[in-house]
């Protein structure tokens, strides 16, 4: 039975996966990491080190428009948040991005076969890199050899609107970010433009089967600058939202399900480029109190939309502010 928590209304450990949409042509934009309403304590640092592996296997052609996504992308993210005072937090997210032919095609095909999932998009050569976009006879992208480098850095600020002070009391935070064009747009490491996001973030804690259930969500907008990645068809404003639920088995181990949604980034007839996005993640986290470290692992799937990677693995270590 779902009830308001009878213990601590809010804790200092955020139980969400710090993820973005990592579709090769969409990850260049300034979508912020999934966060909750917690902000770092005044004078303290909150740090996160995450590594994501995403595998692409999709292709589509409609009229004079063709997109091929094949290969793997790797994302190393270093994120830091600093509590300036009781209501203000400043942060930075610095990514390193790589696109490669990859090594997991055969493993994923076996996984799909095991659970009766389709491998219809995986009939070509395995472990090959092809990020191709062609329109009206012009070839805009043809990345077929490995590339890597720093991605677009994001600067962020958060203002605590309301902090929970009692059981059943929700926390609300206003978060904004500015993404700088530090990545190479020719290699799909960045967009070549400055983007801005703003949104309201909330979280609350309930009790489910006598265990803590942390629920977090956000809604906002992402304003895209005029960049270098297919600028003729790029949208200017993208609505963004997400919700996550974490059920704590005990003080250390928790299980999380999370969804992230975004509007269309491109005016394209191709479903794998121009549709709205829906990204689903399921996984677990393990907190080590004496080390003040939270270890997380999540499996990312494109259950209802092809504008997210076919499959991804998220690993992270977080050191919460204390």
Image (tube, rainbow, N blue to C red):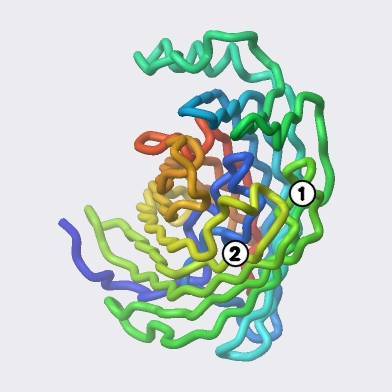
Task: Pinpoint residue 171: horizontal percent, then vertical percent.
Answer: 40, 79
**Left or right position of 222 against 146:** left
Q: Taking 290 as reference, is 82 above or below it?
A: below
Quarter placement of the C terminus: bottom right
Q: Closest to the observer: 239 or 134?
A: 134
**Left or right position of 59 against 151:** left
Q: Residues within 10 Å of mark 1 (few under 14, many from 20)?
A: some
Quarter placement of the N terminus: bottom left
For residue 16, which numbered disc appears in the image? none
In the picture, residue 288 is in which quadrant? Answer: bottom right
Task: Pinpoint residue 268: horizontal percent, then vertical percent.
Answer: 48, 43
Residue drawn at (40%, 68%) of the image: 219
Residue drawn at (43%, 55%) of the image: 263
Residue 255 in sight in this render: no
**Left or right position of 54 against 151:** left
Q: Which residue is mark 2?
A: 224
**Left or right position of 11 against 75:** left
Task: Pinpoint residue 161: horizontal percent, then vertical percent.
Answer: 45, 87
In the picture, residue 223 is in which quadrant? Answer: bottom right
User: Disc 1 and disc 2: Cα gap in Å?
Assistant: 14 Å
Q: Closest to the observer: 152 or 248?
A: 152
Task: Pinpoint residue 3: horizontal percent, then vertical percent.
Answer: 19, 65
For residue 185, which numbered disc appears in the image? 1
Residue 31 in sight in this render: yes
């Amino acid at each position: 039975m779902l009830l308001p928590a009878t213990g601590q209304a809010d804790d200092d450990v955020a139980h969400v996966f710090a993820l973005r949409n990592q579709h090769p042509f969409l990850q260049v934009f300034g979508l912020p990491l999934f966060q909750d309403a917690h902000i770092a304590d005044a004078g303290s640092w909150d740090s996160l080190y995450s590594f994501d592996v995403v595998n692409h296997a999709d292709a589509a052609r409609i009229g004079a428009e063709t997109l091929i996504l094949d290969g793997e992308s790797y994302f190393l993210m270093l994120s830091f948040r600093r509590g300036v005072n009781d209501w203000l937090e400043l942060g930075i997210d610095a990514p390193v991005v790589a696109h490669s032919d990859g090594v997991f095609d055969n493993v994923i095909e076996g996984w799909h076969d095991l659970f009766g999932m389709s491998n219809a998009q995986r009939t070509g050569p395995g472990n090959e890199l092809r990020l191709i976009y062609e329109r009206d006879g012009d070839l805009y992208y043809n990345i077929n050899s490995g590339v890597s480098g720093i991605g677009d850095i994001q600067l962020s600020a958060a203002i605590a609107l309301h902090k929970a002070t009692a059981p059943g009391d929700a926390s609300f935070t206003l978060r904004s970010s500015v993404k700088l064009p530090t990545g190479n747009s020719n290699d799909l490491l960045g967009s070549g433009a400055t983007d801005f996001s703003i949104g309201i973030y909330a979280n609350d804690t309930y009790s489910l089967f006598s265990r803590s259930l942390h629920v977090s969500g956000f809604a906002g907008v992402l304003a895209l600058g005029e960049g270098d990645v297919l600028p003729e068809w790029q949208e200017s404003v993208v609505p963004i939202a997400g919700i996550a639920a974490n059920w704590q088995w005990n003080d250390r181990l928790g299980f999380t399900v999370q969804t992230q949604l975004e509007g269309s980034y491109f005016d394209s007839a191709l479903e794998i480029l121009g549709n709205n996005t829906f990204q689903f993640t399921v996984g677990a986290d393990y907190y080590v109190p004496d080390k003040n470290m939270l270890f997380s692992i999540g499996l990312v799937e494109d259950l209802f939309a092809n504008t997210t990677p076919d499959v991804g693995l998220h690993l992270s270590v977080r050191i919460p502010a204390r």
